[in-house]
Image (spheres, helix red, strand yellow):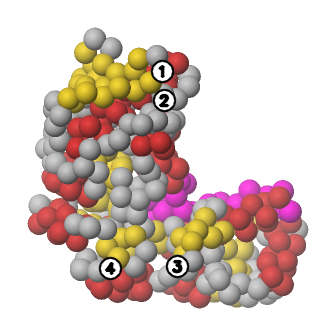
Amino acid sequence: MLGSSVGTLCTDYDLAMLDLDGVVYVGGAAVPGAPDHLAAARESGMRLAFVTNNASRTPRRVAEHLRELGVPATEHDVVTSAQAAARALVERLGAGARVAVLGAPALADAVADQGLQPVAADEDAAALVSGYGPDVLWRDVMRAAVRVREGLWWVASNADLTIPTAYGVAPGHGVLVDTLRRFTGVEPVVAGKPQRPLLDETRRRLDGKRPLMVGDRLDTDIEGARNADVDSLLVLTGVTGLGELVIAQRDQRPTYVAPDLAGLAEVHEAPVERDGAFALAGWRAQVAGGRLEVAGSGPVEAWWRVVAQAAWHYLDDAGKPVEVAGLVAPTR
């Protein structure tokens, strides 16, 4: 169930680990208000880390894009799944080891930055690392697959099945991971969310003592936070809407919910159960006949919180999702 904060999130936590697409920007444009909300969080003393499962862009390029959108960032503030994968490799193999790279140049750069030697997929190596790369050749995929089946240790930067593009949602690196997994019978070490290496690497690089994961996806950002034993804030500016929120299983439920990044500057209060309903700040949500009913008026963020709490309570108790057809969230 949802949690309550003592103060605002940007004072209760020292580091915000921010997912990018759907949280800070959507496509090529900043999420409305995001630069200002992040600036306010920084002014309150919160440090910001920008965390991405995308292994095909270097931290420098990501930081440049953020600055173009009005969000000050350096490459030190950006942590990618390529860096987390390289950390996993060097911790097991040691500096100087040869690693076969199946992915974009940014993945090879991350491997080299850890003191490892990136080599081609058909060269002698102690391990294989794979990541999204639009120019990866099928002959290299075949060679890598055979080598993994023969026993080469394999680290995957992430297992995302989809990736957003200018022409729509396209297959992500997870499709290749699934293909190699089925061909080889081998489960790779996965560095990206929802596995914990990426968030562990972010905490290490940014020295986060009280980190908060901020994301828009339940199955990567929020589940990843739970796997890494950190609290999380779900924002509703990306892929998660009402339909996804109310069916969230326990391992994909956030600590806090907010419509957008303004939630970083808020004190969060969990709804209170009263007579089978959940109430907060003028809103009251309850389930009758399997249907979620919401009454009252008040802040938009409180509406989302009573809805989430009531829906999850019903899901856990009844073992099935609540009906929300026709239910529309208020706007600011």
Q: Secondary structure at mark 3?
A: loop
Label 4, label 2: how far apart the Cα atoms are? 39 Å
The residue indicated by pointer 1 is 290
Nearest-to-viewer mark from 2 and 3: 2
Residue position marked by numbered label 4 in the rendering: 66
Q: Which residue is mark 3?
A: 166
Task: Look at the numbered discs 1 and 2 and tell me whether their residues touch, using CB distance below 8 Å.
Answer: yes
Q: State how far apart marks 4 and 3 are (Cα).
A: 18 Å
Instruction: In the rendered view, tell whether residue 44 sits above or below residue 310.
Output: below
Q: Are marks 4 and 2 in contact (CB under 8 Å)?
A: no
Q: Position of residue 166 (x, y in %)?
A: 52, 79
Amino acid type shown at disc 4 = Leu
Picture quarter with the N terminus: top left
Question: Residue 199, position in %: x, y?
Answer: 44, 59
Which mark lies nearer to you, 4 or 2?
2
- Which mark is in front, 1 or 4? 1
Which of the two labelled residues, at mark 2 and mark 3, occupies the earlier sequence position? 3
Would you name the residue on which mark 2 appears? 323
The answer to which of marks 1 and 3 sits earlier in the sequence is: 3
Q: In the rendered image, is residue 44 in sight?
A: yes
| 24 falls in the magenta region | no
Disc 2 and disc 3 in contact, CB within 8 angstroms: no
116 lies left or right of 84: right
Q: Is residue 243 left or right of residue 7?
A: right
Are dots 4 and 3 in contact, CB under 8 Å?
A: no
Q: Which residues are magenta?
A: 183-205
Tell me the element at label 4.
helix
